[in-house]
């Protein structure tokens, strides 16, 4: 997805970049003092001076990602968000330069923006997908595999090993980066005006059950529930409790624990459970005229 800046936008960007480059750099002692004033006293003037001195860092970082087709101004603004986050989290006691720490936040903010806006389809959600999105083209160029539409199996193996990801992830990201966003309502034939032309959405397969299957399953589930309810009424009080706690609870109670509750041994609980299951099996068999029932209770 490519975005084109207008002439007015380009001119505004140049003015912004030119002004950012005029802001003097800070000595380490000064930036630590400004960071301390912001963190401890919420001094907004200190924050402004600290971040203004590092706008050129944001611009330099955004420039590295300009080939993803997103407006340069938007990349810079997202980088500025990362710069503000770095200012909030910068620990002056660690003895590192603010620019070193801020670079990570700026890059992360820009990359997240690219992943959210490069395509209308979410491109990278896992760490492996993000790593592939930002490194696949670079690695293909390194091994001189960028001129082919499809990578060779050896190239995919090399990239998977280099980035520490699965081969399946490489294949998936290759497909995502090689294709463009397409409307599901776009006609499949070149004759766009043709009345009976199929659209891409017409070929999508729905994995959900059909309406009649849903109704049938609901009806079968209701019937099975009634069968089990009637069968449970054939049990005595102790058998009923053992079956409920051993088979119908969210977590199955152990024989030993249930034996302590009932004041009997765990072996006796096992025997009663076995007797109760036999009763249920007999009752269900009579109810269903001998047809097997998948109640989930019986072994």
Image: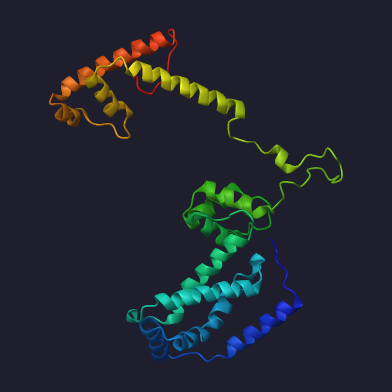
Picture layout, residue 87 above or below residue 147? below
Say which of 85 and 105 sits in front. 85
Please say whether residue 114 is visible from this viewpoint.
yes
> Which quadrant does the N terminus fall into?
bottom right
Q: Could you tell me which residue is drawn at 56 percent across and 28 percent down?
A: 214
How many marks can you see?
Answer: 0
Report whether 208 appears left or right of 244: right
Q: Is 143 drawn above or below residue 199 in the view shown?
A: below
Please give the name of the residue rendered at 30% of the width and 13% of the height, measured from the top-left corner.
279
Q: Position of residue 25 (x, y in %)?
A: 50, 90
Residue found at x 37% / y 17%? 230
- Asked if residue 52 lies left or right of residue 178, the reply is left
Residue 32, position as x, y percentages in the image = 39, 86
The x, y position of residue 146, in whole percent, is 65, 58
Residue at the image position 55 percent from the left and 69 percent from the top: 110
Give the camera-side residue of 230 and 150.
Answer: 230
Q: Is residue 5 above or below residue 244?
A: below
In screen coordinates, is 48 left or right of 278? Answer: right
The quadrant of the image that shows the C terminus is top left
Give above or below for 15 relative to 189. Answer: below
- Would residue 294 be seen by someone viewing this image from the given angle? no
Residue 144 in the image: x percent, y percent?
Answer: 63, 59
């Amino acid at each position: 997805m490519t975005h084109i800046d207008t002439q007015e936008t380009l001119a505004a960007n140049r003015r912004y970049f030119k002004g950012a480059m005029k802001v003097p750099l800070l000595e380490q002692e000064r930036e630590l003092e400004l960071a301390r004033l912001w963190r401890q006293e919420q001094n907004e003037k200190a924050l402004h001076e600290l971040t203004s001195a590092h706008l050129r860092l944001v611009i330099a970082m955004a420039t590295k990602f300009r080939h993803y087709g997103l407006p340069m101004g938007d990349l810079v603004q997202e980088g500025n968000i990362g710069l503000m986050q770095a200012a909030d989290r910068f620990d002056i006691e660690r003895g590192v330069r603010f620019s070193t720490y801020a670079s990570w936040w700026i890059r992360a903010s820009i990359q997240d923006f690219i992943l959210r806006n490069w395509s209308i389809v979410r491109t990278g959600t896992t760490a492996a997908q993000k790593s592939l999105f930002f490194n696949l083209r670079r690695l293909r160029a390194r091994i001189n595999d960028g001129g082919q539409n499809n990578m060779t199996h050896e190239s995919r193996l090399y990239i998977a090993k280099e980035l520490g990801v699965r081969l399946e992830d490489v294949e998936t990201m290759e497909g995502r980066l090689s294709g463009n966003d397409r409307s599901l309502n776009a006609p499949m034939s070149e004759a766009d005006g043709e009345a009976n032309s199929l659209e891409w959405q017409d070929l999508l397969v729905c994995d959900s059950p059909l309406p009649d299957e849903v109704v049938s399953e609901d009806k079968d589930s209701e019937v099975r529930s009634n069968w089990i309810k009637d069968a449970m009424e054939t049990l005595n009080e102790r058998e009923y409790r053992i079956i409920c706690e051993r088979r119908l609870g969210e977590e199955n109670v152990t024989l030993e624990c249930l034996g302590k509750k009932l004041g009997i041994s765990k072996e006796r609980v096992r025997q009663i459970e076995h007797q109760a299951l036999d009763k249920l099996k007999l009752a269900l068999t009579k109810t269903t005229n001998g047809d097997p029932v998948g109640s989930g209770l019986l072994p």
